Amino acid sequence: MKRWRVAGINFDHFHMGDLLRLAHDHPQVDLVGICDEKPDRMEEAARNFSLRSDQVFTDHEDCLKTTKPDLVILCPAAARHAEWVEKVAPFGGHVLVEKPFATSLAEADRMVAAMAKSGRNLAINWPLAWVPAHAKCHELIATGAIGEVCEVHFYDGNRGPLWHGADKIEHEPTDEVKEASWFYRESDGGGSMQDYLGYGTTLGTWFNGGQKPVEVMAMWDREGNGLEVDEHSVTVARYAGGLSKFETRWGTFSDPWTHQPQPKCGFVVKGTTGTISSYDYESFVTLQDSGSPEGRRVEAPALSAPFRNPIEYFLHCIEEGIPVEGPLSVETSRIGQQIVDTAYESAKQGRALPLVGE
């Protein structure tokens, strides 16, 4: 079996640790290098994955030339995704970028263009895509269990991005940490809308078969929080067949992977003949249809190879020469980005706007 050389570059987002663990645990992967401009941010990963000193870099070109990876994992601040894809693409590796796609549609299109020029594949990882409940929700929708999708309701977030690190290890953030973090800088793509709205709009697009809204209206709460970014946003998208709602929240009472807060994090999808509730990290979905108007649980079993995580799935697509599908695909993520862009501008202007990029 082919051995895959994988490198992780830029540790702005703490999800790098999670993705490197998936690569490290893959039986066909050799984790050949990691790179960040700040050496201290790599210490934990180097220790966790027993990397030698000559596999740890502070210059990305040196890392890429030395390790020659087949796949590069990128986790920069959201506003630097395009910049980093353009830096990495000429070296010939496939690229997996941690969510969100970008902070603007223009930046997303730069990423696509850079990878098209290199002839390699690009995928955008949305961690919620690997929740068995959401995969079961999509499967039921695809088999017609609730008819045609006409509404997607999304509420998601956590206590805040500084309350946890790689492997969901908890931290209690101080004011100083918050002030220093890119998550709280608008210029770097911070804020709950930029962090979480793409989850809802991208998986929502997956659920509704690729439909695009006609118009988007959004509001965020920035007044009085002493921050330059939002910690709470609500977006309403008008489609040809109805309205959908996407709500993001930093500051939930609890983190959904430990205890579901109220409101519960996840999705409720309404179709013409039924509804499905699919909540983060639950092992089932609840299906409501004419046969069970009271609602019934449908088990959501653990995902099977090669659909268990982004590293496994992306390498499978590359090896088999098949396109990336679903939320990780450029096509679906781009529609999600269009909605995010429109919502961001709508919140700034305080009015409904037609979908950006149409």
Image (tube, rainbow, N blue to C red):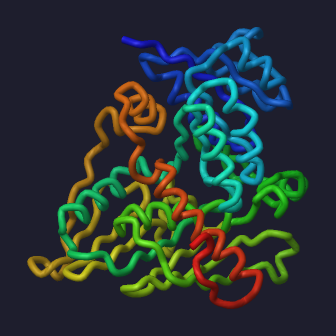
Q: Position of residue 323 (x, y in %)?
A: 39, 41
Q: Position of residue 157 (x, y in %)?
A: 58, 64
Residue drawn at x 31%, y 75% as measured from the top left = 149
Q: Is residue 239 left or right of residue 180?
A: left
Residue drawn at x 49%, y 61% as measured from the top left = 202
Please identify the quadrant where the N terminus is shown. Answer: top left
On screen, 155 above or below 43?
below
Residue drawn at x 62%, y 69% as measured from the top left = 340
Please identify the quadrant where the C terminus is shown. Answer: bottom right
Residue drawn at x 64%, y 82% as measured from the top left = 218
Q: Residue furthest bottom?
A: 351
On screen, 231 above or below 326?
below
All told, the count of numbered labels is 0
- What is the quadrant of residue 49 in the picture? top right
Q: Residue furthest left?
A: 291
- What is the quadrant of residue 314 in the picture? top left
Given residues 338 and 77, the one toward you in this image is 338
Q: Is residue 11 left or right of residue 208?
A: right
Q: Is residue 201 left or right of residue 294?
A: right
On screen, 324 above or below 58?
below
Q: Position of residue 145 (x, y in %)?
A: 18, 69
Q: Position of residue 341 (x, y in %)?
A: 66, 69
